[in-house]
Image (spheres, grey):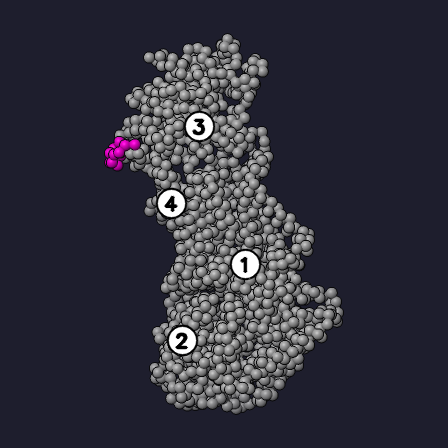
Amino acid sequence: MARKQQAELINGGSGDSSGGRGAPTSFLEVRDLKIHFPTDDGLVKSVDGLNFQLERGRTLGIVGESGSGKSVTSLGILGLHNRRNAKVSGEIWLDGTELVGASAGRVRRLRGQKMAMIFQDPLSSMHPFYTVGSQIIEAYRVHNDVSKQVARKHAIDMLGRVGIPKPDKRVDDYPHQFSGGMRQRAMIAMALSCDPELLIADEPTTALDVTVQAQILDLLRDLQQEFNSAIIMITHDLGVVAELSDDILVMYAGRCAEYGPVDDTFHRPLHPYTWGLLGSMPRLDRERSERLMPIKGTPPSLINVPRGCAFNPRCAYGDLNGDKSTTERPELLELEPGHKAACHLPLEKRREIWDSEIRPKL
Amino acid sequence: MKSPKVVTSAAAGLVVLGLGLSACGGGDDDGDKAGGSGKFDAGTTAVVNPSDHKGGVLKMAQPDDFESLDPANIYYAYGLNFVRIFSRNLMTYTSKPGKEGATMSPDLAEAAGTATDGGKTWTYKLKRGVKYEDGTEIKAKDIKYAVARTFDREILHNGPSYFPQLLAAEGYKGPFKDKNLDNFKGIETPDDYTLVFKLKAPFSEFDQVVGFSGQTAPVPADKDKGVRYGMHPVSSGPYKLEGDYTPKKGGTFVRNPNWDPATDPNRKQLPDKIEVQAGLKAEEIDNRLIAGTVQIDLPGSGVQAAARQQILTNPKLKANADNPLAGFHWYVSINTKSIPNVECRKAIVYAADRSAMYRAYGGEAGGEVATSIQPPNVQGREKGTDFYTKADPNFTGDPAQAKAALAKCGQPNGFSTIMIYRNDRPKEKATAEGLKQSLDKVGIKVELKGYPSGTYTNEQLGAPKFVAKEKVGLGTYGWAPDWNTGYGYLQPLTDVKAIVPTGNANTEELDDPDVNKKWNEVVSVTDPAGRAKIYNEIDAKTREQAAILPNVYAKSLLFRPTNLTNVYFHAGFGMYDYANLGVTG
Amino acid sequence: MVAFIVRRLLGAVGLLLIISAVTYAIFFLVPRAAGVTSDDIAGRFAGKQPDAATLAAIKDRFGLDDPIPVQYGKYIKSIVAGDTYDTGTEKIDCPAPCLGYSFRTNQSVTDQIVDRVPVTMMIALGAAVLWVLAGVSIGVLSALRRGTLFDRVAMGVALAGVSLPVFFTGLLSLAFVVHRWNLLPEVNYTGLGDNPFNLLLPWVCLAFLYAAMYARLTRAGMLETMNEDFIRTARAKGLPEKTVVVKHGLRATLTPIMTVFGLDIGLLLGGAIITERTFSIPGLGQLALDGVNQSDLPVVLGATLTAALFIVLANLVVDILYGVVDPRVRHS
Amino acid sequence: MTAPIEVTGSESEAQPDAVLAGVDRKAIEGRSLGQIAWLRLRRDKVAITGGIVVLILIVLSLPGVTGLVTGWFGSPPNEFHQNLVDATLGGPTEPLGGMSADHIFGIEPINGRDLFSRVLYGARVSLLIGVLATLVSVVIGTFMGIVAGYFGGWVDALIARTMDVFLAFPLVLFAISLVGVIPNKLLGLEGNNLRMGILVFIIGFFNWPYIGRIIRGQTISLREREFVDAARSMGARNSYILFKEILPNLVAPILVYSTLLIPTNILFEAALSFLGVGINPPDPSWGGMLSQATELYSVAPHFVIVPGLAIFVTVLAFNLFGDGLRDALDPRAR
């Protein structure tokens, strides 16, 4: 079952350009998504041609440095970009409905009901002036024609399900009266209040300490089993991805750098950027004498994306390709079943570098 | 400027003309013009709309409020004018248009006071049967009590302080602190209808002291509420308060049935009611005057800029306006201590741009170019001759003479001095700017500094200590006399004895032996004409000393609504006489 | 909540005490330093040409020769406990809060202030209604339509508005609207009995300035709020845009603006000096200004303290309201 | 009363999109903040216009220039032209306030002084007082703000309370009463120099809390930043951290709020002059002219319009430039 779905993903994602191939078969399918922001300083290409698919009950992890376009993508799926200052193109198919071209009202009605989002910082993401309960009630009632009492019962119910003790009391508390973990649970309760089929979690655990992190991840996993939702997990924490995701999508400069099943990608990464990400991940089992291998340099400008391979200025191996790195943009190619990467380096060379230079240091 | 003569002769005509007019208005033909109305300035010399029509409501308004309605606690002329509707004095100003208005007539007294003991004792006999509003008769002790009250400056601090200064009552503290009236030795009341005032020294114009203010208006001792007496003063005149007077709001006066017109030739009782509204914006009062819904602008200093323009440019409105000399002379005092050299002072007078200073007061509708210090309404005043300047609206100064005087002063390149003025009075500011501009031309550098009018006469120009410390050389000043004689006008301004630490009116700090001698002698001169002659000499001497730079005799622009009757300009108060008005319709 | 209010109240009283002490010190010490003597001060009360005995009597009565701290102590005492006042024939109680008697008019300063408060209040409140309505709605619309013609024009006018002082717009409207074109009657308002619509012109002039400021503030605040995470959350829940803007955006935007409003209205209630002077309206500001011009210390002091009281009170009310609106403040 | 409010509110607007902040920084990487600001400012035509007007005003106010310009277009500011004035009404005899080739802005009522040159000389007073008072506010406000923000605790509490007291004072009243009691000579200054000194002091001294609050807030956020921690951990003294580490990072907000405080202070000066406590005559000031105009607007409405417009244009120009500068220095705020 899992294999089959992976195959579908691979097939669907292999084509790179131009949408309009008719209704998709996947639950969620993103085709050539571009999200550009015109500014005084130039056009910011936050997402520049992204493709992926996702089925119900599955989890996709999107990783990348800040500014790589992860969050912009998720907001794009939910249609939360202001159409006045964001140019969105491409296709987003959710359960047979195309969202990019859909009316704002249509997308709004889907938001919160069919697709929901858990945000990074639950304190700033909840309105400070309203009780947690009222914010959940509001989310529920906007999509369900029920009385306040019913909605309140539902809210208490939801709070209980996400593991908040004494939910009938805490329902009347304000967000600032919750602890960080509890707040994130409440946030999740709010997102799940209408049983969404697609759940996007944007760095759901970044602000939390480790023990709470684990609890929240467990919770998400349990809930996924219960609701059979599709989950997109956005994070820069590869550990979270490894634990929760089925597939992984590495983003760099608004594009997909590497894509594949989580095991393949972790154990045989095919992109120097992924190597960098793995190298900069601290691990308990690592010897102390060994040093982290951070990626040198800073993420590129999204206005003047480096010519050729966007990663080339920071790539230790870019020189091996001669001019190609700076003149030609590498295509995303399926190099192993279900495992794609966009890199000019010959596949053999990459495997060699991985095996000899990178892996031993991890 | 090159040929001052041409300018002078041309302007001289104007001045003569102007003087001719004021001489005409001076009282020679009072009465003849009674009945004249609907002409510009008619009310300045005659009664406009004379009428005996009774009834109606007379409405008066003011932007601020009286200092008090306690007749003894008022100094402003308009307040003293107004309280005549409900209070009678021993003596009072004669209710006549023209110069006669500045003279005193008996009021509660049967006749003017008789002086004995070389002018040190003044005796008044009371009319019999004159009553308060409650019907009780007014007796001599009531007036004695009223005068005794004025000794307590702590309680009645607004009114004049002539009685404590003049009367021989050493150590007396007033009836509030010393309940036994017998301890007040300044007045004796041998019977219920006789008052004998005992003075420390001879004083020839005691009738004026008694008559110009409300301080001899009788006060029943049992109704006296001290400071609060002004809320409901007891009436002895044609009107009485209905309820209390509310400061900053106003009050209503109704006929006093116990007032007997037979005893009172100076007041009338025509309207049914007189309503006073305080706190009405000055511009709004003007609007209502023109609309006829308010008849009297109480302060009596004339309309505001907007109405002024409206009236002067509209012949119909102008016909209902009067433009009399208000009694003030606005001049510039030249301090003789800060600028001790008379030649330097003369240089200032020579250089002064009289035209600019005249225009600062609003041209011909605002004033008349001044020659003497005493304005024309002062009894016996003579125009005099100009010293170092020309009373000419077009005279812009004589820089050549000024330079010559500077050379004689030993300061051929000029000198620096400070000129102060009241910064909330635009006209004084304009005067100061005009003078500075002309003095700068001859090298006299003037620095201008404005001060609030609230403190100006007590703490700046009126405080010799301040003047010395800040080296003030020039200051704008104006004076209207307590009563219209040369003594009332000039003594406080020129007598060395008048120099006081605060509230000094001799702002030039003139200490001229000749002038001082004349002041010592004049109080014993019994003949008014003889006194007037000496006053005129003092006037001239002061200007010869270049201690005062004359500017303008102020004229006010008063509007009389057509429904106002018996209206005329009263020389004593410098505005319409409020005690004789009536309304039609 | 009660503890919160009590704490704020105590703070307000303390603030007032400090202000009164500083005010007292400045108004008494600075003139002294500049050479004004107690005789001069007594002279202001005494009127024309006072003699030494009069001055002595007045100094004695007001304790002008006492040390400043003693005078200040008496002043505060009479505010708290009242005072009695000897008229000569009887003793009058000056009940608390007794601010003494005017040097010029001998009237109770408290009475004078009580007289003027309604006038200033009418000016301030009338204008406030206009500027809050106009300023906030324009600010919100501008923020929601950022970059549109409406936004540009509104913000242009608003920037012009904050550059136009009331004494300019006021005089201009008096010169033309009232005097040249006779469109409106003379501004004349002296107390509660008068027609408040006589104040239309001052309202409009004052409100124009403040509306401009509030439009700018509201727009900025709204833009900031609409970028808050919780607005994104509200949208992510699928709430209609109207609910997002009004219930989530506006409420958060208006809370800080309430603080600014508290300060503004407090300042104005203490005396809209410029407006009152421009239109010659006898309010608190004019009273204070007259007091300054006449060196009427008790009036100036009283008016200053009243003004400070209004500011402190307004801030207190805002603080408490803030506690009501924002649960975080209430619970801290 | 009204003016200082402007700078109290959080005028700095929010970022359009959280993403952009990060992006922007990177997009313009490699250029100094000053260069970036200049690039942005140059694109902002409105702000540049404001800046040019301000520049022209400043140039016109330079001692040599004012005389030269008024020599071409007007007459000396204190020269009377009473032949052009109606002696009785006080207004100019010619229509339009006496505007002519000789007097391009018309003439003053009463004494007929040339309005153009008086407005120009008035600009010098307004600008000088506005700028110097701002300087005073900025110096005091920055110092207090940094100290309060950096040290926190009771120091912060004390300074915050002090600011409260200042903000609760009826400023205008205070200023009027204080100006009224100053002696003729003080600290070696006299005449209008002393007067201007006092005005600068009062306006500057009472406005510092507005700057102080902003700087305090900025300091608090800077205090937590890495480079401060770094300096602290290396044992740097507080004064070093305050003035060598934090202060340089406050230059941008100080610059912006100074630019925005100048027009506020110009308005304040005009208000004080309007209330009669400005500089002494015959030196012209805009507020002083308007104060005179309260008596004369019926005969000479241009006497309201001309100085009023001068205030308006100057203040607007500063505001436009200040707004633009803020946008340029703080890309999030637009």
Circle 4 — which element?
Answer: helix
Disc 2 is placed on an element classified as strand
Name the side, left or right, on which B377 lies relative to D72.
Answer: left
Amino acid residing under circle 1: Val
Report the front residue among B468 and D135.
D135
Q: Which mark is residue A88?
A: 3
Q: Is residue D290 left or right of residue A236?
A: right
Counting other residues with Cα less than 10 Å from the Cα at mark 2, is it few (<14), some (14-19), or many (20 or more)?
many
Instruction: State the residue at coordinates (40%, 16%).
Output: A12
Q: Chain of mark 4?
A: C
* Amino acid type assigned to the residue bearing label 4 in the image: Tyr
Give the residue at x 47% y 48%. C213
Three-letter amino acid code of the residue under disc 2? Leu
| Residue B128: quadrant of the picture | bottom left
Quadrant in which residue B355 is drawn = bottom right
Marks 3/2: CA distance?
81 Å
Residue C229 at x, y = what percent?
40, 33
Residue at mark 3 to residue at mark 1: CA–CA distance: 54 Å
Tell me, for residue D4, which label it has, or none: none
What's the distance in space between the residues labelled 4 and 3, CA to CA? 40 Å
Range drawn in magenta: A143-155
Q: Can I make out residue A281 in this image?
A: no
Residue identifier under label 2: B58
Kindly identify which chain the residue marked by label 1 belongs to: D
Disc 2 from disc 4: Cα separation = 55 Å
Residue located beneath label 1 in the image: D304
**What residue lies at 54% left-to-right and 26% top-to-bottom?**
A304
The mark lying in front, picked from 3 and 1, is: 3
The stretch drawn in magenta includes residue A144 = yes
